[in-house]
Amino acid sequence: MTAKTLRNKGATDCTGGPTREQSAIHRKTKVTSGSNGRKPKGFGRFNEGIKRMLKLEAAEKALSDAVEKECLAEEKYYCGLHDRPKSYTTFDEKQFGNLDDPVARDFPCSVVSLALFDGDTMLFACSGIPLPPGRAKLPLTRYVTSERLVRVYQGYMYRDDKLRIVVRLPNDEKVGGLLELYNSHIAIVTCLSLQAVKPLDLIQASTPTSSSDEMIAAGRAFQSGCLMSAKVKPVPVSQKDLSGWKIVNVYKCGPEAVLGGPVIGNDNRIIGINFDVHGAFSPDAENLCVLFVPLDSLYTYLHHFRILSREGLWFREYSLPEGVYTLVPSAFRRRIYRIMHFSYPMPPPPVLELNGVLRNQFEECFGEVCAWKGYPFGVPPYSSVERVWVRLGNDVLKDVSRRVVSVASFKGYNRLFACTGLLIKWRESTAVLTSASVIGCCHDHDESYGLCKDFMCNSCYYDEDGIRHGQMSEIKVFLPPNQRANGTLKLYSSNYNIAIISLDKKLIGTRPEDIFKENSTRKSSGKVVAIGRETIRGLLMASMGEVKPRDKDCELDCKDLKLSTCKIKKAGIGGPLINFDGSFVGMNHFDGRMVTPFLPKSKIVQVLRQGVSVRRDDGPVHLRDASEGSRINRWPVPRPYWYHGLLDADRDDHLPAVSRGREVSDMPLLFIIWTGCLCQGM
């Protein structure tokens, strides 16, 4: 019976009330839940913040997993390296000649020691000579050494190795080095700092030596840091551009230490640099013969490496000179595999080490980016104050998202070109209208033959009769989120950079554009929008502008081109230019400027009408414009190139250096990490 019932009956409630602890718990519960039993103010915001953070973590993990999957596929295709052995044998560094010879203290240049390590295990050690400083703004110190270091390095390259070069200076300071360039005789090791060393003087030539003259060969030990030298005499050798020497007296001999070190004549001038051991040798050096590169040959090599040339090593379109090679550092292999997969030029080693930027790449986004529905990688950071997609409206956005595709050409596993395409109604099916650059018809021209050749793969091109020469590249079409199809070139015009690509299967849920249909009479706002598809994830990109008259600065010489003030990148080539009602205006092209040339719809329709009824079973139809006569329009595409401000003698801007262990997903080269909340789908 409750206390209230007892009071109603006139009885006395003898039960004890709640204890002090129970009352405290009741008050705490009441304060926590609120007087009305609802959750406290601010609890909902906190809960939303937690959900947003969890979504962000899920998006980052999804992107990381996708990148890892792509990298593993590239590593499987390009790597070919074996698994790392469980243990290595530590290099046994042996003495050469006399230690710290007083004569050697007055050498005309410094002598350093170079060692190859895998983790903390030393695998090899030799010597090196500092070279004169270059023209780069960044203070670099380069050392020339024997090519033997490269051969040992290559012998220890494994899938997960941690190879590194360490330079020991005469003052016993140790600095990291980068094995940069090499040929069959010498190698260049670069340190990303300026060291207090005396460089080699390549101008002063030594007096020619005879077979009876004595010389000095020197090297530096890595572990002790001691300078070692021995008296030697020249011997004839049969190898071209090389000389040789033998030791005069019997010394304790470890010939590896002297490799990369100098050979000095009686006049205390450098004669050459030790290259390799010739023939068999014994520990007492009785039969030891060492080959060395004479100073004049060394000068020729360094000039060929472009280290001594006036234009320097770093220029816009870098390529390795003939007969010159480079090694990929362990920490950058995944990045190099991605560069190879996309057929980009290889970066100069210091540019790679210093996190240089690849410009004019296909992965650059433009304008405002819009993700497709269900996009799992978060909100792209590319936004615009103009809010292009909002102004276009939901109906236009749906049409664009179902007819704009990403198009890429491949040669085997290597991608050659990437751009945007537009699904159109073609005959009784759906086809892709895009730029003919994707199949190598309009990159560049051979003026002497009038042929359009693919400068990127140089393996396939079509002549003026539409006959294919070389291996045909594959064409792949991507419509997000997961529709992919193989394409076949059916019709193209090299003069107007137009291509029609058929698909091997039907894409679902598309809304192809009928470009042969006249536009509605709806009044235009005067604004136009350039549309593109991002090449990897398939994001939509849009940039707003206005149509303006063609100017004289356009790199494309087609007289029918017009200009818009929309700003696009290379991925926007072949994409549509539309009005705000979604009607097709023309096809975008790119010449590297802040404006966009485009071929108007009227000209595209005029050219394509010639091929609507033409069919060919043995290859694509090549359309010609009789009014153009023999003139061929050029459609150059800006080539990708590597840049770093501190390695360019003519520029001031620069990028910060990064550590060598940086992962692929952290790089600004080819991947963009998108963070934020999940975006609204289309």
Image: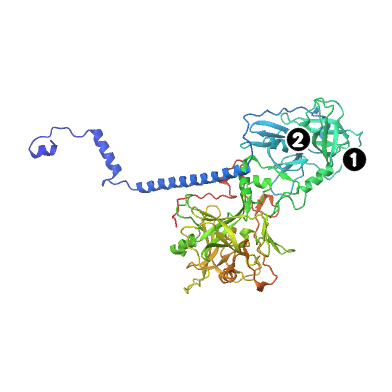
Where residue 22 appears, x then y in whole percent? 24, 35
**Where on the picture, by quarter, is residue 112?**
top right
Q: Which mark is residue 208?
A: 1
**Mark 1: which secondary structure?**
loop
Whether residue 107 appears in this view of the structure is no
Q: Residue at x 64, y 40 (%)?
A: 80
**Percent coordinates x, y for residue 524 in the rendering:** 49, 72
Query: Residue 515 versus residue 346: which sits nearer the camera?
Result: 515
Which quadrant holds the N terminus?
Answer: top left
304 w.r.t. 435: above or below:
above
The answer to which image quadrant residue 490 occupies is: bottom right
Rendering quarter of residue 268 = top right
| Left or right: 298, with 432 as reference point | right
Residue 372 percent across, percent down from the top left: 47, 55
Amino acid type for the residue under numbered disc 2: Ser
Residue 648: image location, x then y, percent: 69, 52
Residue pictured at 35% horizontal, 48% vertical: 44
Q: Please say whether residue 123 is visible from this viewpoint.
A: yes
Give the amino acid type for the residue marked by disc 1 in the picture: Pro
